[in-house]
Amino acid sequence: MGAATVTGHAPHDRAGDALAVAVDGRRVEAPAAIAHEALDAPAGDLGEHRHLDRGRRLAHQALEFFTPSAILYGEGHPQRSLSPKGCRKVDLGYDVEESLPSLGMYAVLTHDTPVLQQVLAAMRTAIEFMLPDGSWDNSWGTRNYKWSWWGSRTTDGCHPGFILLAEHDPRLKEAALRNLELMRSCTHNGLLYGGPHYLAHGDFPCIHHTFTHAKALATVLDRCPQPIPDSRLPLPRDEPYGLRSYPVIDTHLASIGDWRATVTAYDLELSRLAGRADTAASKLAAVRGEVLRHANALEAAGARRDAAAAELARAEAEADAGDGDAALDLTREDRDRVGGLADRDELVVDFDRAGHAAARGAE
């Protein structure tokens, strides 16, 4: 490992101290991301080598969470436990869009060869799960309730790490470019939608998708000024290779003829339970919004009803105080105004009858 000279943006040492948080018990992307941030933010400008040391320690801590088949696990609690079938907690979306790019950028900036080699192996495994159109097939992951066709809803994107490491394997840049093209096709009016059919079905975009992935693309422009290749490269699932299996997640990839399929018997409950909780919270928020809307409507209707009753009472009082003709004229004059208020709240008032009764009383 060599020393790193990097640029940072921390205004004072407290920014570095804030990164010195405990990561025990967190999901695996926490030490991966903090390893990169601990390096990038305070160490360069302030010469704080203790942050470099912490970043190195966290990066090597993350190395403990790779399987022999180069799959990064630990996306769940407890991190190291196995499912009843012996599966690890893995989420492709968070791996390719957050954890691996963070570790990869750390490895390049610090020349940390062991981390670099492990991340490269994991990225090569990850692109096995990319479909030919650039989508990440995370239908089986522990956080698949956040899965979108182009990635994961609240992560940053694969592009910085994959493009930065493409000098070691050009297919990584090809994967990043395909994914970028897919995101572009899902972007409308400057907002990244959750999938290719959201706009057509009238579903709204979430701004979180846009600003997190825009941040990743800004990092590419800042740190990875590499030209787009003239020729494109094949990726693993472009070719009909048959079947490939990954026992650690009990998932099988099929590439037969023109068909691409993923078959899984993954038995972790995290995604199902968390997805149900998110769905329930969303439905509860929608119900509360409807209740509030109806309450506001009822309150407004009550106010209009009271205003109509007050107008009617005033008209009747003025009619009682005047002669018959004046009473009739007064009620005709006020009929449209009072009747309009009454009709909006389905009040039925016989103004002619009330007016004639008042006139007869005046006689």
Image: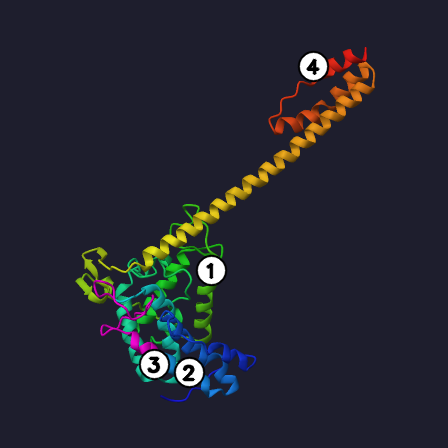
Horizontally, residue 62 falls left or right of residue 51, namely: left
Q: Does the segment drawn in magenta span residue 64?
A: yes
**Element class at badge 4:** helix
Q: Give above or below for 165 relative to 157.
A: below
Given this view, does label 1 or label 2 mark the residue nearer the observer?
A: 2
Q: Position of residue 231 (x, y in %)?
A: 31, 69
Q: Which residue is mark 2?
A: 54
Q: Which residue is mark 1?
A: 208
Residue 309 or residue 326, whichever sits in front? 309
Q: Give above or below for 198 relative to 212.
A: above
* Residue range (magenta): 60-87
Q: Residue at x 22, y 67 (%)?
A: 248
The answer to whether one can see residue 97 in this image is yes
Mark sitting earlier along the chain (2/3): 2
- Between the residue at mark 3 and the residue at mark 4, the CA separation in whole angstroms equals 90 Å
Mark sitting earlier along the chain (4/1): 1
Q: Does the segment drawn in magenta span residue 195?
A: no
Q: Which residue is mark 3?
A: 60
**Element class at badge 3:** helix
Of the 4 image quadrants, the one containing the C terminus is top right
Q: Amino acid at mark 4?
A: Arg
Q: Amino acid at mark 3?
A: His
- Between the residue at mark 1 and the residue at mark 2, the CA separation in whole angstroms equals 30 Å
Q: Residue at x 72, y 29 (%)?
A: 310
Residue 275 or residue 33, whichever sits in front? 275
Horizontally, residue 305 falls left or right of residue 49, namely: right
**Element class at badge 2:** helix
Query: Mark 1 near mark 3, Cβ–Cβ under 8 Å?
Result: no
Q: How many numbered discs?
A: 4
Q: Position of residue 141 (x, y in %)?
A: 30, 61
User: Could you say which disc has been placed on residue 124 in the image?
Assistant: none
